[in-house]
Image (cartoon, rainbow, N blue to C red):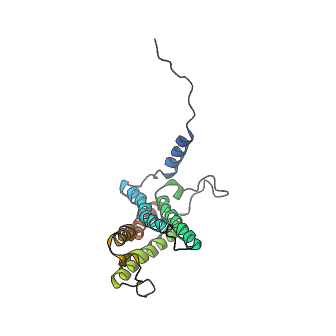
Amino acid sequence: MQPLHHTEARDPTPSGRLRAAWHAAHEPVPGVSRRLRLVAYAVPFTVLPAGLWRLAAVLDESIGIGERCYIVFLSAFSEAVAFTAIGLIARWGEVFPRRIPILGGRRVPPKPVTIVAALGATFLTLLWTVLTLITEIMGTTVRGDDLPDDFPSRAGGWEAASYYICYAPLILWGPLLAILTIAYHRRRK
């Protein structure tokens, strides 16, 4: 007995179409090395542990609903901003997606992207790489006040260890973004 052969082409499943669209949108443009691609994909993962650590704080019953909403918003916003680093290597960082009215399909002007990315890299490097290290060494807040006794790094044990493990990757966010910004500028000039 011969096996039955299907001659009809199957429609891709919704998840298959979504996956194909995701890969098409985030595929690196020509001229992007494997190293730069890894750097770009690493940026959101430098932010993710801190966001997850903050989201765990939402479960604390001693904080109000406003603070809980702020924590969720800050975590989601930070991750979304970190994700834009992928645009420095992907097609959507060079050509506006067609679904955007008026701009769709047009070339993204490289100068404003480079300026915003450079300012972001500078700010993030100063905030997380320089200022955070200085405040940790000096034992003060960003404003110069002494750290409160209930600050996670002062708790000791697993609480302090989880705090440092989750926040340490943020030190890399600014420098990695700077590397991507320089590469984007060189590729697009």
Number of numbered discs visible in the structure rendering:
0
How far across and down, in percent of the image, does residue 147 sit? 40, 84
- The residue that appears at 49% across and 70% down in the rendered structure is 60
Residue closer to the observer: 145 or 125? 145
Question: Which residue appears farthest toward the top when viewing the image?
Answer: 1
Place residue 184 in its image quadrant. bottom left
**Vertical placement of residue 48 versus 22, above or below:** below
- The residue that appears at 38% across and 56% down in the rendered structure is 38
How far across and down, in percent of the image, does residue 9 sit? 56, 28
Question: Which residue appears farthest toward the front when viewing the image?
Answer: 61
Place residue 181 in its image quadrant. bottom left
How far across and down, in percent of the image, does residue 83 sit? 49, 61
Question: Which residue appears farthest toward the bottom when viewing the image?
Answer: 145
Residue closer to the observer: 61 or 4? 61
Residue closer to the observer: 87 or 3? 3
- The residue that appears at 54% across and 45% down in the rendered structure is 18
Query: Is 140 on the left-hand or right-hand side of 21?
Result: left
How far across and down, in percent of the image, does residue 43 sit? 42, 62
- The residue that appears at 45% across and 71% down in the rendered structure is 121
